[in-house]
Amino acid sequence: MKDLPDEELFTAGHTACPGCGCPIMVRAAMKIFGPNTVCYFPANCLLVFGATYPQDAFKVPYLHVLFENSAVCASGIKRGLKKLGKGDVNVVAFAGDGGTADIGIQALSGAAERNEDIIYICYDNEAYMNTGIQRSGSTPHGAWTTTTPVGKKIAGKELYKKDVPRIMIAHDVPYVATASIGHPADMLRKLEKARDLKGFRYLQIFAPCPTGWRFDTAKTVQLAKMAVDCGLWTLYEAEDGKVTINKKPKMTPVKDYVKLQGRFRHMTDEQIDSLQEWANKKWERDSAMVIE
Amino acid sequence: MVEKRVVTGNYAAAYGALLSRVDLIAAYPITPQTFVVEHASEFVNNGMLDAEFMRVESEHSAMSACVSATAAGARTFTATASQGLALMHEVLFIAGSAHLPIVMPVINRTVAGPIGIWAEHNDTMPQRDTGWLQCYIESNQEVLDMIIQAYKICEDKRVLLPMMVNLDAFILSHTVEPVEFPDIEDVDKFLPKYKPEHARLWPEDPMIIGSFSPPEYIQEIRYQTDESMNNSRKVIEEVNSDFAKAFRRDYYGMIEEYQTDDADAILITLGTVTSTARPIVDEYRDAGKKVGLVKLRFFRPYPTELIRKIAEKTKAIGVYDRAVSFGSGGPSWIDARSALYGYNIPVINFLAGLGGRDVMASDVRLMFDRTLEAAKEGKAKKDVVWIGTRGVEP
C-alpha cells in the first residue's frame, strides 16, 4: 500500500453514494495504471458519479459510447492508438455486472476470443444499481431487487449468480482474476499484474452497494470481507488458465453475511439453506479448478 | 500509373479503403457485403494495406470499434448491409453526435421480414436521422471514387461527420464493370493523413468524449450536428470539383442533372435505376417528349435548394423510391415534397423495385408518362404509385 503514488487520477468531488464500493476500486486501479491510461465506461453508476458534464473526476482521457460494447470499445481505442504509434497506453474498461454478465457478454466474449490487448474490469455490485436496483445475472439467490420483489408468491431472486470469471477462463485468455475491495492488498497486486501483462485481462472485483443491498454505509468493507469468508465470493486468479486460489474461504455461515443486508431480510431458513448450499458447491467448483 | 481493371462494386469499395490508407477496419460478414471484408482482409494479409483489422463478432461491435478507434484518432472503415446496419443503428448516433468521420459502404439490401438479400433502400433510409451523410451510387467507378471523396468531405473541419456510401445489392456489389484505379500517390495528395484536433484519446492531452450530459448542454450538441450537416453541402461541391480536377471525373456534387433545362417533366432517381432511366430520357426526347432526369446523389444532407431550382424549371416532378415509409410514401419523395412546399407543381411518388425486384425500362416509361400527364393536367392522378405490384393498379 505504501508504494502507491500520491497523485490521484480519480479525484475527490465525485458524487458516488456514501459507502459505495466502486470508487474504492477505481481510485486504487487508477493509481496502479497511472497517467498513461485511457478509460472506457459504459452506461453505469461510475459514468454518472465520476463524470457528469461539465464536471469530471478523471485526469486521464475517457470514452463513453454505449452500454453493451465496453470490451469492443476498449479494443477499438487500443487498436487505434497502436496504429498511431501509441501502443504503450493502457486501455481499461470499467463495467458493472449487468453491463458484463448480461448485455455486454457478447462483445466481452468476442474481445476475449481475439485476445485484444485491454484490461476489462467488472465491478460487481450484483444488480443494475444505476437504473434503480434491478436484478442482473450476477444477483445472488434470494436477493430482493425492484424486479425480484418480495411478493406473496415469490420472494426475491429464484435463480443463482452467473459465474462470469469461469466463463472468461474458458476463453483461454492470459489473465482472469477475482478480487474484492475488502482485500485491498490482493486487489492491488492483481491490478498490477494485469497492468504488466499483455493481451486480454479480465478482473471481476466485488464491490458492495449500500443503496441497493440496504446496509449500513459504514459496513461496505466488512461485508466485502464477509462475502469471501462465507464462500459466496472466492479470490482466485488464472494465469494462462492455471488457477491459483488466493484465499481459502473460512466457510463461515452464509446466514451471518445475509442478516446484515436488507436485500436478504425476507429470506426464509429454507432460502438461506439454498444459498448456503450454493456457496458450498461454489467452493467445490472453484477449488476443483486448481490442478496440482 | 492509372490502371483500368474490371471489378465488382464490392472490390471497388474495399480498394477505395486501401487507397484512402485507412488505419483500422472492423467488420462482420453479411451478404451481399462479404466480398468487401474478404478483399480488405486480403489487402491487409498481403501487406498491401497497413491497417489494424478487427474481425469482430457482430456489426454492433464493428461500428463500436470504428467509433472508438476514430475517437482515439484513427481513420476507420467498415461495411455492412441490411440487418447489419439495423444492428448498428444504436451506435450510428454516437458517430454523428461525437463528430467522428467514419466512412462505411452499405450494400443496400432488403430488411426482413420476410428475409431477402436483394436490393432495397429500406436499410439505409431509416438511418436518415443518425447524423450520417448518405450518398447513393450508380456505378462501380463511382463507388471507388466516393470512398476517397467521402473521407475528404467527412474529415473537413466544417463537417466532421460520418458517411454511408450506398450501393445497390448485386446490381453493383456483385457485377463487374471497368474501373479506373488512381495512383495511390495521387490519392495521397488529394486526401492527406487524418489529423484530428477535436476528438482524440491521447493521455498527453486528456479529452473526454461522450460524457454524461444534462439538458443544459445536449441541445447545443444537436445544433452543432445539424450545422455540420448543413455545412457539408458546400464541402461536397468543393470536394467534387477538386476531385474532378485531380482525377478527371466529375459527379456534379449533390445532384446530377440530365436534360432538365427545358423539361416539362423531371424524374428524380437514386441509385442504379438512374442508369435505366437515362436512355429513356433520350428515347423520349427523340420522340419529342420533353423529359429530364435528376440523379439524387446525396439524400443526407438533402439538396433542398437544388431541388427547388429544379422545380422552377419544370411543370411536374416524379420521385422514384426503392423504400417506403408505410402509409406515408417513399422517403425520397417525402423530402422532395417538403423541399417543394409552396411550389405549385405536382410531385408524384413512384415505388418500384422493392425487395430487389427488377425495375424495367417499361416501369420507368410509366414514371415519365405519369409525370408528363401531371404536367399537362397540372395535377397528379395519384400521389403514391406502386409500380409492378400484383393486384395493384399503378
Image: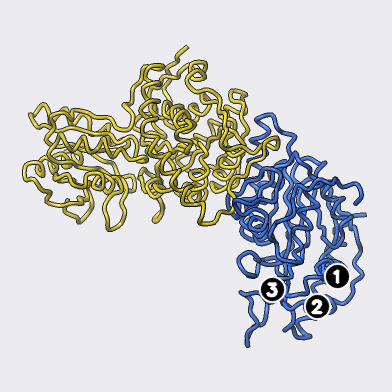
Chain colours: A blue, B yellow
Chain ID for label 2? Answer: A
The x, y position of residue A290, in whole percent, is 88, 57
How many residues crowd mark 1 within 10 Å: few (<14), some (14–19), many (20+)? many
Front residue (pair A200, A46): A46
How many residues crowd mark 2 within 10 Å: few (<14), some (14–19), many (20+)? some
Horizontal side, residue B103 vs residue A83: left or right: left
Tell me: residue B276, above or below residue B111: above
Decide which of tag 3 and tag 2 comes sooner along the chain.
3
* Residue picked out by circle 2: A260
Q: Secondary structure at mark 2?
A: loop
Tell me: residue B23, above or below residue A220: above
Q: Which residue type carries mark 1? A: Met
* Residue picked out by circle 1: A226
How many residues crowd mark 3 within 10 Å: few (<14), some (14–19), many (20+)? few
Decide which of tag 1 and tag 3 comes sooner along the chain.
3
Horizontal side, residue B386 vs residue A10: left or right: left
The mark found on residue A159 in the picture is 3
Chain ID for label 1? Answer: A
Which residue is found at the position 79% from the left and 73% from the top?
Answer: A278
Q: Nearer the viewer, mark 1 or mark 3?
A: 1
The mark found on residue A15 in the picture is none
Which residue is found at the position 65% from the left and 30% from the top?
Answer: A84
